Amino acid sequence: MRRLSVVILLACLSVASFAMAEEATPTPTPAEVSPDTPEFTPGDVIVIGRREPAEVVASFQELTEDDLRALGVHNAAEALRAIAGARVDTAPTSLSANGKNESLLSLRGFDPRDVIILIDGVPVYEPYFRVLDLRQIPVSNIAKITVMKGPTSVLYGPNALGGVVNIVTKRGSGPPRGTVGASYGDVNTWQGSGAVLGGYGGWDYFANTAFTNSDGFLMSHDFGRTRNEQGGLRENSDYRDLFLAANVGYYRGLTGLSLTADHYQFAGGVPFSMEAVQPGTLWRETWKKTALALHGQWAATDFLLVRARAFYTRFFNTITTYEDTALSTIAAGGDAVSTYDNDVYGYVLLPEFLLGDFGSITLSHIYKRDDIHLQDERGAEWNQFGAETYCVGGEYAEHVYRFDFTLGAADNVYRRTQTPTTDLGRDNDAVDYQAGLAYSPVDALTLRVGAAHKSAFPDLKTLYGANGNPNLKPEYAYNVDAGFQLRPLPQWELASTYFYSDVTDLIGKHDVGNDFFYENIDRAVIQGVESELRLNFFRGLLLFDANHTWMRTEDHEPHRLLHSLDFRPANTVFVDGRLRLPFGTELDAQYYYVGERRYELPDASHSIRTLPEYGITNARLSHTLRWDEGRTACEFFVQAQNVFDVYYQDSPEKAAAGRNITAGFALDF
């Protein structure tokens, strides 16, 4: 009955769209749009005179290319720490145990599995765990990052309880250009990048490469000796990585096609526990991700715009377990090498009916297939898992006077296709719905309110892993947002949002003696307030941005002693200041504060522990020289992370990096 109601709603929306189209104000056709106007990037569509509805009524933040440079970050993981309500670290969060030292994103207290990561509008995730290590995306390939939280659009599909992040990659335009950058930092850390880009006659191209080679990181001088660490260079923190990417496209106005491809590979250590008697000693020997995506957009008529994406991503990962902290002997007689050979492929289809004064209707059809090939140790039998996700949805958006309104619904199906055992379990289905309203009584003030019922399916690890349960059901969240944005003067802006989520059928660990299995046994409540202040003095000479998130979580699982979700800080603060002098010198500084994080040990003791609060400061000084009438520029910079060498832990018994100083240059020619 629920699925039938959604189908009826979508059919009514489609019929209404054709009925109103004849009376609607015409939308610019491809012939009316200049071919040189950058109206489209693969993951970011802008129709002239209109913003995406989700950006108007949702909790929305954006990091531009200029923001990424000023922050001095190297990858998407470091960049997203500046977002209100975001936590990017290596700590375990609920089911994302994170034993591989990956940088995972949590939004508003939700597990990283419940945050959708898009690259140019394409979902990217490792399909066994349904997470993505965000260090895999260097800033040299990023044009901007958009983050939508809370009651987001149903068009993104399931598994977005916390929100959606879209990383938009760079594209070329205009005459051929090139960029080259390099830096050197503490403990022999080399980083470099290069790109070529351009476009002509509707064609555009961009190619980029980036690499890092590092002996690891130094711990703070305040670090005290432990069982497995002596101080100085962190044991097993060395790594090297390589990134390659390219895209090419042809667009005439709002119609065109583009192809993107990228490859990432990593090899490095996993810093082990500093106190454990027998710490896990792991080395990520081969860590590869290869992705292809085809993006298309077709302005079929004055009122119909069709967007489509087809994608394929392969993850090939091997991780080796050693018997000792010197990493001299591989465990299990040399066979302790786990291999993951996993694939994700599918498509996204988004026909949008542009109805002028009557708003717009966007329909969506999403298909994803996950194929897992897993070998627990060298010579062992390969285990195979599989699942498919189908999503059909629709969203209506309207602007009337000073009101913006969205209403959407989607039907999601999760079909299990393969498992090593005979018990596949039952397929899952869930209906999501969402509504949002924004009102601007005056130009300087916008009020927003939104609500959504969202679902998240089990991942393949919790279904069929060592402690899996094929009978798991979807998790559900009722998300509510209410906020305002005030801009009384062009120089300053204040925004604040209250958020509330009631999560049911939360998947947790059901203890049975000394073992456990996964079960829908938990319920959680998450609520909080995000606030942001932006100031602009002297026409951009001095910029100031600060955000604060207060969050309270409640864990209602009866068997737990800790009645809040693990590792969720009550308070986080980010402050960013930028001084831009007219002769090309710029000084940027940031402060990050994270409150204490409590957690319950996952063993028979159920002891409650606390990671202390911390605050770190980063700074960057740069000077840019320009010549050739401004067409060529070279920036020289020096930057320091954790300027005051504060000791802290992102994860239990694992020290984070102390002070790190880097110097380098970036040439644009």
Image (spheres, helix red, strand yellow):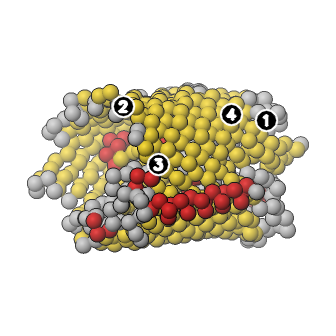
Question: Circles 2 and 1: CB distance less than 8 Å?
Answer: no
Q: Is residue 444 above or below residue 29?
A: above
What residue is rendered at 48% in x and 42% in y? 57
Q: Amino acid at mark 3?
A: Glu
Q: Residue 98 or 582: which is nearer the viewer? A: 582
Which residue is at the front of the view, 131 or 239? Answer: 131
Residue 179 occupies quadrant: bottom left
Disc 4: CA contacts within 10 A as few (<14), some (14-19) or many (>=20): some
Q: Residues within 10 Å of mark 3 (few under 14, many from 20)?
A: some
Q: Secondary structure at mark 1?
A: loop
| Residue drawn at point x = 66 percent, y = 40 percent | 478
> Which residue was labeled with disc 1?
557
Query: Could you say which disc has been placed on residue 415 in the image?
Result: none
Front: mark 3 or 1? 3
Q: Position of residue 248 (x, y in %)?
A: 36, 71
Quick one: label 4 or label 3, which is nearer the N terminus?
3
Which sits earlier in the primary sequence, circle 2 or circle 4? 2
Amino acid type, residue under disc 1 in the picture: Glu
- How far apart are the alpha carbons under marks 2 and 1? 46 Å
Q: Say if residue 512 shows up in the picture.
A: yes
Q: Which residue is mark 3?
A: 398
* Residue placed under numbered mark 4 in the picture: 525
Q: In this orientation, which residue lies closer to the viewer: 203 or 291?
A: 203
Pointer 3 and pointer 1: residues touching (CB < 8 Å)?
Answer: no
Camera-side residue of 646 and 576: 576
Q: Name the residue that disc number 2 marks.
A: 442
Near mark 2 (Cα within 10 A), the count class, few <14, some 14-19 or many ≥20, is few
**Picture coordinates of residue 15 (x, y %)?**
55, 63
| Marks 4/1: CA–CA distance | 11 Å
